[in-house]
Image: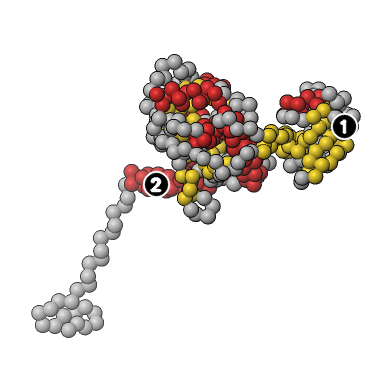
C-alpha cells in the first residue's frame, strides 16, 4: 500500500509517473502543407458559390424522330404520331440534336463550371449576354423556346405533307405584339390575318408587302379572324429604324392540315429540330425506310418554303451526335464555317440548304453512294 508523501513499505516503491513526452513540433513543410490544404478547401468552397456572367454550351442528348418518346402520361409511344392516315414502318434513325446551356436565367454557373468547360474541347464558354438578352427571366426563356418549338413543328409538318403530295391551307397569324407597337391593342396574338388595306394575305410575303404599301404613320384597315369570328380593325402604322412601315407585330405561319400530326419532343425547346422533324414525317408517310437502316443525325430550322436555316451550338451538336452513335450528320449550309475542322472522328458532315437537299442526302446515304454529296 502507499502512503502520502510517496514513502514505501515492504518491497514496493511508490514513485511519481514520468510526464509524457512533449509532442514533436510540426516542421515548416508540414505547416505549409496544412495551409495549402486549407486554402485549397477555401478556394474550392468559394468556387462553388461565386457565380460568373457566362453561359456554358455543352453537347446535349439526341432523339430519334422515328423512335419512341415518353409522353406526359408516362406511357411510351411514337415520337411522331400521324392520325387518320396510313403510315409505313421505318428503320435506322433520324436524330435531332440538342445543346445543353448552363449559365442562363435560373441556372448560373460557378468558377469550376467555367474552368471545366475551358479544358473540354466539346464545350464553349460565352458571355451570358451573347446568349440571353439582359433582364430575360427563366420563364421568358422557357416560353420563347416552347413557342419556337411549336412553330417549328408546324412548318416541318407543312413541308413534309406537301412533299408527300397532300394539300393543305397556309394562313398567317399574329405571333407576337410588341409592347410599343404603333398599332397598340388593335391586333392581338393569335389573330389570323385575312387582308391588309384590302389586299389579301396569302402568306408571310404578301402580309409584309401589304404593310409596306401603307405610308408610315397612317392608319390601315386590317381584316382578321379572331377566335373564329371575322373582324376588321383600324391599326396605326409606324416607321422602323431602316425606314420600313411596321405594325409592331411578329408574323407566324398557321396551317390547316388534312389530318393530325403530333410531335412529342419532351422538354426540348427552340426551332432547330425542324429539318429533322420534316424528314421523319415524310419517312412515315412514304413507303420504304428512308435511311436504309443508317444512323443519321442533323440540325437546322425549316420554314414553310423548305429553306433550312442556321442554328447555334453546332459543334456541340456534332459531338452529341457522335456520342449517340450517329455516323452521318446533316448541317445547315450557313453553319459550314463553324463545322469545318470540328467534325468528330467517325462522323461525316454534309451541308444542306433546303429540305430537298436534305432528302437527297439521306437517300444517297441510305444507298451508300455519298461521293457526290457536298461536305462542309
Image x and y of residue 249, in percent: 76, 35
Q: How is the image coloured?
A: secondary structure
Q: Quadrant of residue 9?
A: bottom left
Q: 345 and 130: which one is in front?
A: 345
Q: Which of 285/339 is in front? A: 285
* Eye-nearest disc, 1 or 2: 1
Q: How many marks?
A: 2
Q: Tell me: 96 left or right of 183.
A: left
Q: Is there CB contact under 8 Å for labels 1 and 2?
A: no
Q: Position of residue 46 (x, y in %)?
A: 50, 46
Seen at 87% across and 32% down, the residue is 220
Q: Which residue lies under the disc numbered 1?
A: 220
Q: Quadrant of residue 268?
A: top right
Q: Is residue 310 visible?
A: no
Task: Give the number of the disc on residue 37.
Answer: 2
Residue drawn at point x = 67 percent, y = 37 percent: 255
- Examine the rendering and report whether any part of residue 68 can be seen: yes
Height in image: 212 above or below 102?
above
Residue 179, percent across and down? 78, 40
Toward which corner of the image does residue 257 lie, by quadrant?
Answer: top right
Judge left or right: residue 207 versus residue 65: right
Q: Residues within 10 Å of mark 2 (few under 14, many from 20)?
A: few
Amino acid at each position: 500500500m502507499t502512503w502520502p508523501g510517496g514513502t514505501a513499505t515492504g518491497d514496493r516503491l511508490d514513485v511519481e509517473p514520468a510526464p509524457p513526452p512533449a509532442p514533436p513540433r510540426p516542421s515548416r513543410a508540414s505547416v505549409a502543407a496544412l495551409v495549402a490544404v486549407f486554402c485549397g478547401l477555401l478556394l474550392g468552397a468559394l468556387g462553388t458559390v461565386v457565380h460568373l456572367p457566362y453561359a456554358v454550351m455543352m453537347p446535349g442528348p439526341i432523339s430519334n424522330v422515328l423512335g419512341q418518346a415518353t409522353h406526359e402520361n408516362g406511357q411510351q409511344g411514337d415520337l411522331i404520331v400521324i392520325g387518320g392516315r396510313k403510315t409505313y414502318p421505318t428503320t435506322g434513325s433520324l436524330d435531332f440534336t440538342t445543346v445543353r446551356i448552363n449559365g442562363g436565367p435560373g441556372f448560373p454557373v460557378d468558377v469550376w463550371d467555367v474552368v471545366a468547360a475551358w479544358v473540354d474541347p466539346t464545350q464553349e464558354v460565352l458571355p451570358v449576354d451573347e446568349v440571353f438578352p439582359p433582364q430575360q427571366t427563366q420563364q421568358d426563356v422557357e416560353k420563347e423556346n416552347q413557342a419556337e418549338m411549336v412553330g417549328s413543328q408546324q412548318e416541318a409538318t407543312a413541308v413534309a405533307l406537301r412533299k408527300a403530295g397532300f394539300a393543305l391551307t397556309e394562313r398567317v397569324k399574329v405571333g407576337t405584339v410588341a409592347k410599343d407597337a404603333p398599332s397598340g391593342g388593335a391586333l392581338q396574338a393569335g389573330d389570323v390575318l385575312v387582308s391588309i388595306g384590302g389586299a389579301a394575305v396569302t402568306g408571310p410575303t404578301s402580309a409584309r408587302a401589304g404593310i409596306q404599301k401603307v405610308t408610315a404613320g397612317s392608319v390601315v384597315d386590317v381584316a382578321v379572324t379572331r377566335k373564329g369570328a371575322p373582324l376588321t380593325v383600324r391599326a396605326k402604322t409606324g416607321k422602323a429604324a431602316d425606314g420600313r412601315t411596321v405594325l409592331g407585330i411578329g408574323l407566324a405561319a398557321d396551317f390547316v392540315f388534312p389530318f393530325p400530326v403530333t410531335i412529342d419532343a419532351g422538354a426540348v425547346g427552340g426551332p432547330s429540330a425542324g429539318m429533322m422533324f420534316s424528314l421523319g414525317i415524310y419517312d412515315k408517310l412514304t413507303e420504304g425506310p428512308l435511311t436504309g437502316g443508317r444512323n443519321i443525325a442533323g440540325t437546322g430550322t425549316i420554314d414553310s418554303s423548305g429553306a433550312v436555316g442556321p442554328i447555334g451550338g453546332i459543334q456541340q451538336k456534332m459531338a452529341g451526335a457522335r456520342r449517340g452513335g450517329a455516323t452521318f450528320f446533316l448541317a445547315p449550309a450557313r453553319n459550314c464555317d463553324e463545322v469545318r475542322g470540328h467534325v468528330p472522328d467517325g462522323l461525316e458532315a454534309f451541308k444542306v440548304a433546303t429540305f430537298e437537299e436534305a432528302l437527297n442526302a439521306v437517300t444517297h446515304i441510305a444507298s451508300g453512294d455519298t461521293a457526290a454529296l457536298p461536305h462542309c
